[in-house]
């Protein structure tokens, strides 16, 4: 899974993003739309190659303070 570049986990009633997400070091696109997320783990900011983060249609109340460290 270390070479995974695109991950779509949408509309699966996901309640939290697992901390091991940071191990997906090649991930460029993460789509976790239409779930039941209320927050994102700070480990998501370790994804240095991430260029698209799709999180619409969740119940996000807050983002990690370090979210600004993601590349645009």
Image (tube, helix red, strand yellow):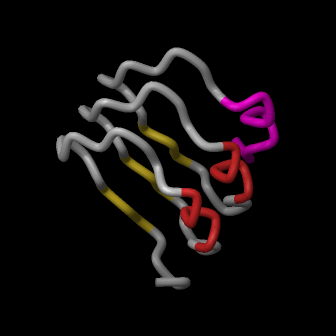
Which of the 4 image quadrants contains residue 58? top left
- Image position of 27 (left or right of 64): left
Which of the 4 image quadrants contains residue 64? top right
Residue situated in front as seen by the camera: 26 or 45: 45
Residue at 31% in and 56% down? 8
Residue that extends furthest to the top in the rendered view of this protein: 61
Asked if 3 appears above or below 32 in the picture, the reply is: below
Residue at 25% in and 45% down? 10
Placement of the C terminus among the 4 image quadrants: top right
Asked if 35 appears above or below 10 in the picture, the reply is: above
Residue situated in front as seen by the camera: 33 or 39: 39
Asked if 16 appears above or below 37 in the picture, the reply is: below
Q: How many marks?
A: 0
- Image position of 42 (left or right of 7): right
Which of the 4 image quadrants contains residue 19? bottom right
Residue at 71% in and 49% down? 45
Q: x%, y% of residue 49?
A: 67, 62
Q: x%, y% of residue 51?
A: 60, 50
- Magenta segment, which residues? 64-72
- Image position of 39 (left or right of 70): left
Q: x%, y% of residue 68?
A: 78, 33
Q: x%, y% of residue 43?
A: 68, 52
């Amino acid at each position: 899974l270390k070479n995974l570049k695109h991950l779509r986990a949408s509309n699966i009633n996901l309640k939290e993003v697992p901390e091991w997400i940071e191990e997906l070091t090649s991930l460029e696109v993460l789509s976790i739309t239409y779930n039941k997320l209320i927050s994102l783990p700070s480990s998501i900011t370790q994804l240095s190659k991430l260029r698209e983060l799709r999180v619409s249609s969740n119940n996000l109340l807050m983002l990690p303070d370090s979210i600004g460290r993601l590349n645009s």
